[in-house]
């Protein structure tokens, strides 16, 4: 009996190893983003015994994720022969960083280039870091482009190029931590790590390009490593996944990832939401809110964030505010009011500031926290939720026009 189980395990491991190696465009597989099982399979495929593999996996994870190393040489508790073998077969290199911009308010934006992985050209992905007094939030992308077509969203005008892999999702966090000094001094001895209180990236939000629940498996894998104690050690309460409302993925997110949830609501009736968040036609408001009510782990201490973009004359009346409060009754919620960030060719305007405040005051007076998201990093056009790919970058003229628009209101 045990023989057949072993055979099955061997078979599975061989399958996993083959799958991981094959996924890398003929290049050496990158070990970042692999779960423990996949990493075990790869180690066994280069001759590490099953007995040793578990310990090696744990050591490698600590070097990669706790210490932030990008080469095998420094892994001093792994013998030289194995280190060489690892380097011959695998890599833990960072992706190419095409651009790094630092705003005068401390916001940073990075542009990464990832291999095509069969999608034609290499792809480019933006990641934004937003420092605030009590936290530092990294806004991470899950796809290049998006299949959905929310009318106020610039990403919605771009076709889906491809899903990002778990490696690529995690790399956005790892390189941000590299650049911000969130990994311990690489020269220092020992296995120390930067304690939570001293880190710059304290929170991550899946609010960059793409719909994370349409790339569930990769997002899940990346977030489980981001929150793993031997991994990047972020508390699941500091990880927020934002969805436009892919109902079947919502409960799965609570059950299988266990992170915080944000819902891009943006409208309080189906007629308007069908228009501005078209996935509403498939999963209308009542179904969406029912899934929120049943979100595993939801409580007053773990509220769901409802994002609400403020579109002048479209969804920003006091009647909308009233409806919003009515709809969310009984759901532990907070409401994040987002001033609309205009882009060239968009049909909307941002609500007037005093209207946003009135809206917020009403919602607040009815028992919901309703912070207004302050526009950040405008000098580098770094709006989270409005990231774009190089392939469809704005031309200089459009960029200048947008800058003029952007400085014209707000703050
Ligand atoms: N696809 C997911 C996550 C990415 S979008 C989702 O839709 O939730 C992240 C957030 O930014 C969403 O709430 C989205 O509606 C918002 N957003 C998109 N474009 C925006 C814009 N131009 N101005 C303000 N918020 C925007
Ligand atoms: Fe896609 Fe989110 Fe933009 Fe809608 S708001 S188009 S779901 S990225």
Image (cartoon, rainbow, N blue to C red):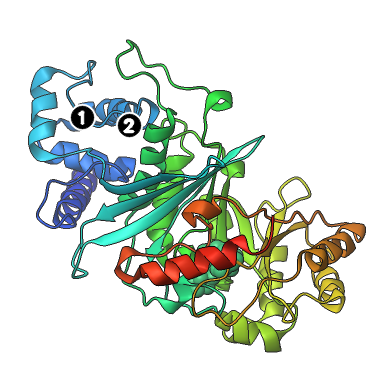
Mark 2–mark 1 Cα distance, whole angstroms, equals 12 Å
x, y percentage for residue 378? 55, 54
Residue depicted at x 57% and y 76% = 152
**Where 93 falls versus 390 (above or below)?**
above
Nearest the viewer among 202 and 152 is 152
Badge 1 local density, few (<14 within 10 Å), some, or many (20+)?
some
Quadrant of the drawing holding the C terminus = bottom right
The answer to which quarter of the image holds residue 180 is top left
**Where 211 falls versus 58 (above or below)?**
below
Nearest the viewer among 75 and 100 is 100
The answer to which quarter of the image holds residue 202 is top right
Residue at image mark 2: 61
Residue depicted at x 32% and y 64% = 390
Q: Residue furthest right?
A: 365
Badge 2 local density, few (<14 within 10 Å), some, or many (20+)?
many
Q: Is residue 184 visible?
A: yes
- Tag in front: 2 or 1: 1
Q: Earlier in the sequence, mark 2 or mark 1?
A: 2
The answer to which quarter of the image holds residue 24 is bottom left
Residue at image mark 1: 71
x, y percentage for residue 271? 69, 89
x, y percentage for residue 153? 53, 73
Q: Secondary structure at mark 2?
A: helix
Nearest the viewer among 174 and 112 is 112
Q: Secondary structure at mark 1?
A: loop
x, y percentage for residue 188? 33, 12
Residue 123 placement, left or right of 402: left
């Amino acid at each position: 009996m045990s023989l057949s189980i072993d055979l099955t395990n061997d078979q599975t491991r061989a399958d996993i190893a083959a799958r991981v190696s094959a996924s890398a465009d003929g290049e050496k597989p990158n070990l970042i983003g692999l779960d423990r099982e996949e990493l075990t399979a790869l180690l066994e495929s280069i001759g590490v015994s099953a007995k040793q593999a578990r310990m090696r996996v744990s050591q490698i994870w600590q070097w990669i994720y706790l210490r932030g190393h990008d080469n095998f040489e420094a892994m001093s508790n792994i013998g030289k022969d194995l280190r060489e073998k690892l380097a011959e077969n695998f890599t833990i290199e960072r992706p190419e960083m095409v651009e790094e911009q630092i705003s005068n308010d401390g916001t940073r934006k990075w542009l990464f280039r990832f291999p095509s992985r069969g999608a034609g050209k290499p792809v480019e992905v933006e990641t934004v870091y937003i420092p605030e007094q009590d936290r530092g939030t990294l806004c991470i992308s899950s796809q290049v482009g998006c299949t959905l077509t929310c009318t106020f969203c610039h990403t919605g005008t771009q076709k889906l190029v491809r899903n990002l892999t778990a490696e690529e999702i995690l790399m956005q966090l790892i390189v941000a931590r590299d650049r911000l000094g969130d990994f311990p001094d690489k020269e220092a001895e020992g296995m120390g790590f930067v304690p939570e209180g001293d880190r710059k990236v304290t929170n991550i939000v899946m609010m960059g390009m793409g719909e994370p629940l349409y790339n569930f498996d990769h997002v899940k894998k990346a977030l489980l490593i981001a929150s793993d104690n031997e991994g990047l050690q972020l508390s699941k309460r500091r990880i927020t996944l934002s969805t436009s409302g892919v109902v079947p993925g919502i409960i799965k997110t609570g059950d299988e990832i266990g992170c915080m949830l944000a819902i891009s609501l943006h409208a309080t009736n189906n007629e308007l939401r069908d228009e501005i968040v078209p996935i509403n036609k498939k999963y209308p408001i009542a179904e969406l809110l029912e899934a929120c009510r049943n979100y595993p782990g939801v409580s007053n201490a773990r509220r769901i964030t409802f994002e609400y973009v403020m579109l002048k004359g479209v969804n920003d009346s006091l009647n909308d505010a009233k409806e919003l409060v009515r709809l969310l009754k009984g759901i532990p919620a907070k409401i994040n009011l987002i001033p609309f960030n205009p882009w060239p060719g968009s049909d909307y305007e941002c609500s007037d500031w005093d209207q946003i405040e009135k809206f917020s005051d009403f919602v607040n007076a009815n028992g919901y926290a309703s912070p207004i998201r302050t526009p950040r990093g405008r000098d580098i056009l770094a709006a989270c939720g409005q990231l774009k790919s190089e392939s469809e970058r704005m031309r200089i003229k459009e960029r200048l026009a947008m800058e003029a628009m952007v400085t014209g209101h707000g703050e």
